Image (tube, rainbow, N blue to C red):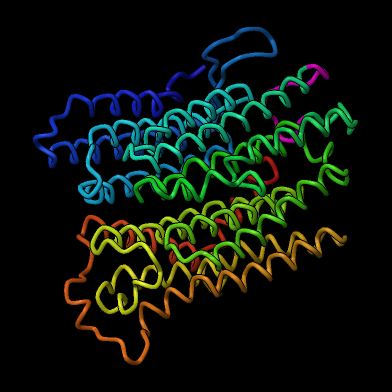
Amino acid sequence: MNYLILLPTFAAFLLGAGVVYQSMDDIKKLNKYAVLSTILVSLTAAVTLVSMSGESVTLFHFNDLLKISFKIDGLSTVFGAMVSFLWPLAVIYATEYMKHEGKQRKFFTFYIMTFGVTLAIAFSANMLTLYLCYELLTFITLPLVMHTTDERSKYAGTKYLVYSVSGASLAFVGMMIVLAKGGSLDFAYGGLGTLGSDTTILLAYIMMFAGFGVKAAIFPLHGWLPGASVAPTTVTALLHAVAVVKAGVFAIMRATYYLFGTQVLAGTWAQDMVMSIAIITICFGSWMALRSKHFKRRLAYSTVSQLSYILLGVTIMTPAGFAGALSHMVFHALMKIVLFYTAGSVLYMNHKEYIRDIEGYGQKMPKTFFCFTVCSLALIGVPPLAGFFSKFSIATAAAALGDRMGFIGICALMFSALFTAMYLLQIVVLAYLPHKDFEYGKLIKVKEAPKSMTMPVVVITATMVVLSLFSKPLFTFFEVVAKGGF
């Protein structure tokens, strides 16, 4: 057993707690501590992922069925690497943005600790461990959602808490059913296999899908996500692109491929049900995003839709579908965090929250809106950008099913792509091509965001473009992971 697997998580908690001892009188020193701490945790996680693949450790052993264990496999490597790359950049962005919000010491304490909890979810070796870390993620992110402590943030935080705890409780019941049927909670590719596809087992899967699906914002359990947009943009970007929603998706991946297994689920009414939920959510989220006039809320509903692209790939229940889901999980994180940071930069610099107010901003904030445009095109699925490859792989896997649900899934992807183009390109057109009578003079005070905010946006966009151009090795890796390798 190698306890060093836990080092990134423990480091994040210790360094996060250390923020409390930083003086608010010297914000530069506090910001420097937060950035260096996050980079240290990220590097520790990277070394752990590379050097300890296949290693495991048991922290507590209650009995043969219940234990707190951690292990690094292919899926945890994908999730852990994604989180470890984005978190330091998010903290760099936050050092400037949080000057606008205040309470930096409280914010960075929970922000860094959330990094540790997310890594613990990635490294969980069984469903009990993942469930406990998943619940901890809810409580550790709650102060971030309620950061401003006004009435709107308190309401959003309460809603987030009720939704998350209720969903986790449903997932817990599903876990207990698995144990009662003689199954194991340990993650092993292929899952239960020998238990068969009886109604009780399938019901347990549906409960876990719905329970973890709360954080993945499936319809109609998505209500907490748009409301959480009242939180600082650094938090909403974290919630909607990296940690919380992706933790829900990650848990569903684990349940589908590593706990129950496609041998048990594929071809059953349970598969049809979860595919239907994903398809409905894809269409619903796209439609609601198009209707929304608030910048961050539009992006929030976009997240609702895009997360179910990933879930559609998962619920196809083939290695090809799983590989497509993994690719979109990573690419969506890169694309969506840039879109949110653009909204945050507009709010920070000019206090504008609505899409109608950004006319002409493309000229005044060239770096920010260039990156926004590139990532918007990628999210729409324009080749040769990353979103095209991930969506195409999901559509191809759906077509390979050769049945009614696969065909409906492809139609949903096409419908959503059209709506995604409409709700994102509207913003791009407004920013670069204002109406003919528009007076640029009223934008005299509008300027580009500070370097500490534009640098993460440029770096993430450049990374997305590089991964787009050299996507073949990455997709090969995803295909190996999707077959239980690595």
Q: Which residue is the extreme one toward the left? A: 25
Residue 375: give x, y in percent of width and height: 45, 67
In the rendered image, residue 389 lying in the magenta stretch gets the answer no
Q: Is residue 113 visible?
A: yes
Residue 224: give x, y in percent of width and height: 53, 43
In the rendered image, residue 184 lying in the magenta stretch gets the answer yes
Exactly how many numbered labels are in the figure? 0
Residue in the image at 47% along x and 69% along y: 376
Between 38 and 352, the one nearer to me in the picture: 352
Which image quarter: residue 40? top left
Between 118 and 155, the one nearer to me in the picture: 155
Residue 393: give x, y in percent of width and height: 67, 62
Residue 388: give x, y in percent of width and height: 58, 68
Residue in the image at 47% along x and 41% along y: 243
Q: Which residue is the extreme one toward the bottom? A: 436
Residue in the image at 62% along x and 74% along y: 418
* Relative side of 37 to 477, left or right: left
Between 104 and 379, the one nearer to me in the picture: 104
The part of the chain drawn in magenta is: 180-191
- The secondary structure making up most of the magenta span is loop
* Relative side of 88 to 131, left or right: left
Q: Is residue 327 visible?
A: no
Q: Determine whether 180 is above or below 404 in the image.
A: above
Q: Quadrant of the C terminus?
A: top right
Q: Determine whether 338 is above or below 241 in the image.
A: below
Residue in the image at 66% along x and 34% along y: 211
